[in-house]
Amino acid sequence: MSALAASQAASATTATTTLVHVTQGVELLVLACVLAVLGRRWAGQRTAATGWALWMFGILASVVVLGQFPVEDDGSLLRHGYTVVLVCVLLVVPYALVRFALALGAIGRLRHRVAAALTVGMVVATILSPRFPKANEDRGTWFTIYVSIIIVGWGVQSVLAAAGLWATGNQQSTVVRRRMRTLAAGAVVVTLALVAAGGSGSPSVSSQVFSALAGVVGIALLVLAFVAPAWLRSAWRAQDLLDLAAAERGLMVALDADQVAATILPSLRPLFAAIECYFLDVPGLSSGAPTGDGAAEVREELHADTSDRVVVVTSRGAFGCRLSTGWLVVEAGTLTPVFGPAELLLLERVGTFVDLALQRCRLYAEEAKSRRVAEAANAELQTLVYSVSHDLRNPIISVLGYLDVLQQEHAAELHGDVAHYLTRMTVNAQYMQSLIQDLLELSRIGRSEPQPQAVPLGDLAESVAAEVLTLHEGSSIRVEGDFPVVWMSEVRARQLLTNLIDNAAKHGSAGSTVVVRCAPGPEGQAELTVADDGPGIPSHYRDKAFEVFERLDAAHTDVPGTGMGLPICRRIVDSLGGTITLDDPEAWTKTGTTVRVTLPTVVVTGWTTSPAPREREHVT
C-alpha cells in the first residue's frame, strides 16, 4: 500500500509539474504578444501609461523566462544573489501597476508614495533575507515573516491600484469603465495567485494548480485591458453603438448644422472614450465648437495634411475625419483603451453619415431660401394683379357707360361708320371688362377662400350642366358615374365645373356632345373627366393651354372667352393638392379633348350612388 501511495503521489507531482509548465508557456506566449503590441504603440506615441505598462509586462515576461531555468538557493553568494535579484525584479510588478494607475489619474500622489515605500521595504527585506528554502524544505520563522511582508506589500499595492482604477471607471463611458474594472480584476487575481503560491508552508497540489491557473487568468485580464482586441472593444461598446445608430437615424431629420451637431456629438464621446468631440470649419454652425485649448493646434495640423486619408491623426492624439467642408474631430484621452483600425473605420463611417446630413441641410437651407424668395415674389405679383385689376374696373365701367349713352341718346346723330366704330369699341371694352374680372378671380384663389363644406359633386355637376345648356344651342351634356362628396368651397367647386363644362361645350361644333364622368381612383382619390367631341388640341399645345390669356383658337373670334378658364381651373385644383391635365379623346369619339382632374383623398369625404346616365339637350 505504501508503494502504491508513493506511486500515486509521484504521478500527481508529475502532473502538477506538467500543468505548471504548460501554464507558464501560455503566460509567456501571451506576454510576448502583448509586448509586441505595446512596443509598437510606444514607438508611435510615447505616453507614460504605455511606458509603465510595457515595463510591467516586460518584468513578468522576464520572470517567466528565468523561471524555466530554476536555480536552488544553497546559500552561496552566486546562487543566493541570483534568487534575490529575480525576486526583487518580480516585486517591481505591483509598483509598475501603481505607476500606470497614476499616469491615468486613477490614484493620487499619496497612494503612490505608500506604494513606493512598500516596494522599497519588500526589496530591502529580500536583500536582507538569508537562504531561500527549497520546495520540500521546512520554512523557518524568518521566511514566514518575509513571505507575509511580501504578500501584504504586494496586496496593498494591488488593492490601491485596483480601487483607484475601479473608482475612476465609475464616472466614465462604458468602454472605459469596463476597461478599468478589467484592470482592477486582473490586479486582484494576480495577488490571489501570489497568496496561493506563498501563503502556505508546504504548498499542496491543489494550491500549486490554483496558483498557476490564477496567474494565467490574472495576466490574461491585464492583457485584455491593456491591449483589448477589436471584438472585445465592440462588445464593450454594444450599448454605445445602439445609441450611435439612434443618433444616425436622427441625422435624417436634422434641418441645420446645429441640429446635426446636437444629434451626433453626444453619442461620439462615450463611444470613443474621448475627452472632446467637435466640428472644425463647418459652415452654418453656431454650436458644437471646440472648448479645449488645443483646437487651434489641431486645426493647423489638419489643414497642413495634404494626403487623401479620410481620417488624419494629429500629434495631440486627435483624430480628424475629413468632411466635404470642414472636419469632425475626436480627441482621445489617457483613458481611451485603443484607437486602432476598427475605431478609424467606425469614425470614417460616422463621418460619412454626418457629411451627408450636412450636405442635405445645406440643400434644404438653399431650397428654403429660394422658396421664400419665390413665395414673396408670387405674393407681390398676386397683390399687384389684384390691385391693378381692381383699379381698372372703374375706368372701364365709365367707358362702357359713355358708350351706352352715345348709342342710346345720340344714335340719330351718328353717320357713316361712326355707329360701327362705337359697336366695336363697346365689344372690346366688354372684352376688357371680362379680362379684368377673370384676373380678379384668379388673384382671389388662394388669397381669400370661402368656407369649405361638404359638396355633392354629382348634384353640382347636374346643376352646372343645366345652366351651360341654356347658353349653347344644339349641344348635349351627359353626367354619369359615381361622384364624390368633396370638402371644399362650393363657390370654387361650381367655378371649376362651370369653366370645364362651358369650355368643352363652346369649343365644339353645332350639336357637340360633352360627357362628364367621375370614378374612384386606386388610392381613394376622385378621378373626374370632362370630354368633348370637338376639334381637339394637339398634344404639343396642351401644356400651353393652362397659361394665362392663352387662347389656342384665337383666330376664331366668334368663340367667346378670355383664355383664363383653364388657368383658373388649374389654380383651384392646385390649391386642393390635385392635378389637372389635357388628354386624348375618349373611346366614344374620334376627335375632341379630355380634361382629367384628380382630387386627392384628403378632400374626398364619401361617394354618392351612381345615377342613371342622363343626357341633357338644349331645348329651343
Image (tube, helix red, strand yellow):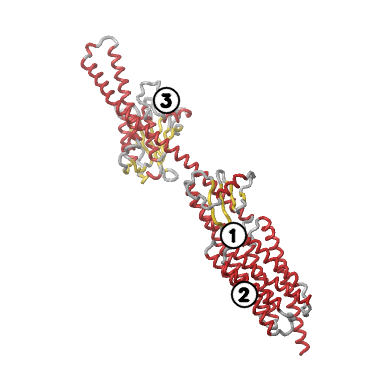
Query: What residue sits 40% from the left and 22% below the top?
Result: 554
Q: Indicate the amino acid at tag 2.
A: Gly
- Number of residue marks: 3
Q: Where residue 202 sits in the image (x, y, percent)? A: 70, 83
Q: Where residue 408 sits in the image (x, y, percent)? A: 22, 17
* Residue lying farthest to the top in this orientation: 416
The residue mark sitting in front, 3 or 2, is 2
**Label 2 Cα neighbours within 10 Å, binned few <14 / some 14-19 / many ≥20:** many
Q: Indicate the amino acid at tag 3.
A: Leu
Above or below 594: residue 415:
above
Where on the picture, by quarter, is residue 176? Answer: bottom right
The dot on residue 218 is none
| Residue matched to label 3 | 552
| Residue matched to label 2 | 155
Q: Indicate the amino acid at tag 1.
A: Thr
Above or below 348: residue 113:
below
Above or below 158: residue 434:
above
Tag 2–tag 1 contact (CB < 8 Å): no
Query: What residue sits 58% from the left and 61% below the top?
Result: 335
Q: Where residue 388 sits in the image (x, y, percent)? A: 33, 28
Where on the picture, by quarter, is residue 43? Answer: bottom right
**Label 1 Cα neighbours within 10 Å, binned few <14 / some 14-19 / many ≥20:** some
The residue mark sitting in front, 1 or 3, is 1
Q: Where residue 417 sits in the image (x, y, percent)? A: 29, 11
Query: What residue sits 39% from the left and 37% below the top?
Result: 573
Q: Secondary structure at mark 1?
A: loop
Residue 116 or 608: which is nearer the viewer? 116
Q: Secondary structure at mark 2?
A: helix
| Residue matched to label 1 | 334
Q: CA distance from mark 3 to mark 2?
A: 100 Å
- Please identify the quadrant where the C terminus is shown: top left
Is residue 108 among the parts visible in the rendering?
A: yes
